[in-house]
Image (cartoon, rainbow, N blue to C red):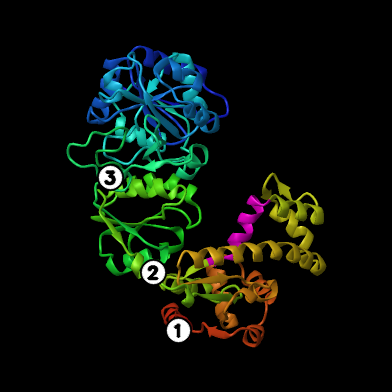
Amino acid sequence: MTTVCYNMTGTELDREAIAYAAQVIRSGGLVAIPTETVYGLGANGLDPDAVKRIYEAKGRPSDNPLILHVPTAAWLERYCRSIPESAYRLAKEFWPGPLTMILPRKELVPDQTTGGLDTVGIRCPNHPVTLALIEAADLPIAAPSANTSGRPSCTAAEHVLEDMNGKIECILDGGPCTVGVESTIVDLTCEPPRLLRPGGLPLEELERVLGTVEVDAVVTRQMGEGEKPRAPGMKYRHYAPHAPVTVVTGTPAASAQYLLEHIEDGDGVICYDEFAPLFPCAEVQRIGSLQNKGEQARRVFDALRSFDHTQVRRILAQCPDSAGLGLAIGNRLKKAAGFHVVDVTGADRSTESFRVIGLTGGSGTGKTTALQVLGAMGIAVIDCDQVYHELLVSTPELRQELMAAFGDVFDGVHLKRKTLGAVVYHNAEQRERLNQITHRYVVAEVKTQIEDAKRAGMRGVAVDAILLLESGLGELCDVTVGITAPREERIRRLMERDQITRTYACSRIDAQQPERYYRENCTFLLENASSREAFAEQSETLFQKIMEVNEHE
């Protein structure tokens, strides 16, 4: 059997592909479908033989119930009975979206779909391709995740192809999933309603509509022998890569410290972006930034799945707290680990020792080496140049101010660098005007990130900015460190690193502050006049001194 893959990533639906897939569904075949959560392995949910093929293709136990996917809440009465008013309130608020409701089933829904239960899980997915397919087939589509049973779920069509090639008729490629973890499952057949699986809709949102929602015990532990699953994903080990996983809970700083102390040769690491520099010799998968749980949810299955293409013998994973999407992300990681969890909450560092180190200096002085040393010490790095460029995309107010000051310098949300450069490069007054606008936004964002890092229990933060002192960022720092290097050494490094001429390297250096500026205005000065290894050792000695003084104050 050949898997057929249709590219559905454009703005227009491929109606021929939809019609073909609908025919496959109607004839009892299997179609991998895109949703906002993960890819599903779909079949006619009213056809026992078609549903049986899902279990066979996945290698899934037959007592593990499936979810029926419908296009609107109007279909609830077709397949469910005794529907409470709360179901319609939830559907109005969250459908289409990552929410599955457990309701009493009607007799036309077969045992094969419900795992022999008298209830059925039902949801309306938020993806135009799958909604169009359900409408075209005029049938509810039963669909678990489209991975081999036990493996990490699929968030891209290529993951489905990896697991299901030759086992199913068709894959509809709808692009990468935007949520990244499966739907939230809430049981509405009991009072109060019960959360059976945390997912893409946070528990807090359910509570906002329903009031009290109980959390089932198996959300945080393995289901025991003899317990019968009431929803998908409750009973069996799920989401697991080939290598065993250990999940570490606690503040990000404490869990990172545990990983540093316990990592061995051949281990893999799943960690927040901020801590990736701590593990230069390990196979590292970044799960996203500390403050962005949406990004963490989108990356968690990719991170787990990626290790199957490596030789790692064990995986150590940082785990977010249970607020918002963190409950679902942590649940997936813990199930992947078979609930092998190490809690290091008691090892959390006191925020009293938190310190902000400002780092500045001209091009070619060696700031990158110093920043790598700080990262290895467990200190997060805020790259102010990166902050600026992210703000250009994410902050319309900043774009509006820049356009009001300098004209048409944006293509949509993307800055026309050459256009802006032509205005400000040779005009000191215009450069100062640009700095006055951008520094205000950057300083506010850096202040927010520093507070976020402090609340996360991190040891400290390094703020990296060429204009650290001129912008006002230095006022946020406990100490400032200026990095200098001999002129000829800087010229050589710039020529090698950036592949530029000596003349251009000299012009860049001459446009920046002289060494005496940093000597006169910074708390400490680091001179990089030797090898990279010697400078790294020199930097570590200074930074350790800075942190030790603070921790013993």
Residue 309, x across and y down, in percent: 30, 47
Q: Position of residue 311 (x, y in %)?
A: 25, 53
Residue of label 3:
240
Residue in the image at 40% along x and 31% along y = 188
365, 82: nearer the viewer: 82
Quadrant of the image for the N terminus?
top left
- Marks 1 and 2 sit apart, C-alpha to C-alpha, by 28 Å
Q: Is residue 534 above or below residue 397?
A: below
Depth check, mark 3 against mark 1: the one in front is: 3
| Magenta span of residues | 382-395
The amino acid sitting under disc 1 is Gln
Which residue lies most toward the left here?
Answer: 225
* SS for dot 2: loop
CA separation in Å, label 3 and label 1:
43 Å
Instruction: Return the residue found at the far front.
Output: 191
Q: Position of residue 379 (x, y in %)?
A: 46, 71
Residue 390, magenta (yes or no) = yes
Q: Are marks 1 and 2 in contact (CB under 8 Å)?
A: no
Label disc, if present, on residue 348 of the rendered structure? 2
- Per the rendering, the mark at residue 538 is 1
Circle 3: residue type? Ala
291 sits left or right of 518 in the view: left
Mark earlier in primary sequence (1, 2): 2
- Judge left or right: residue 14 versus residue 522: left
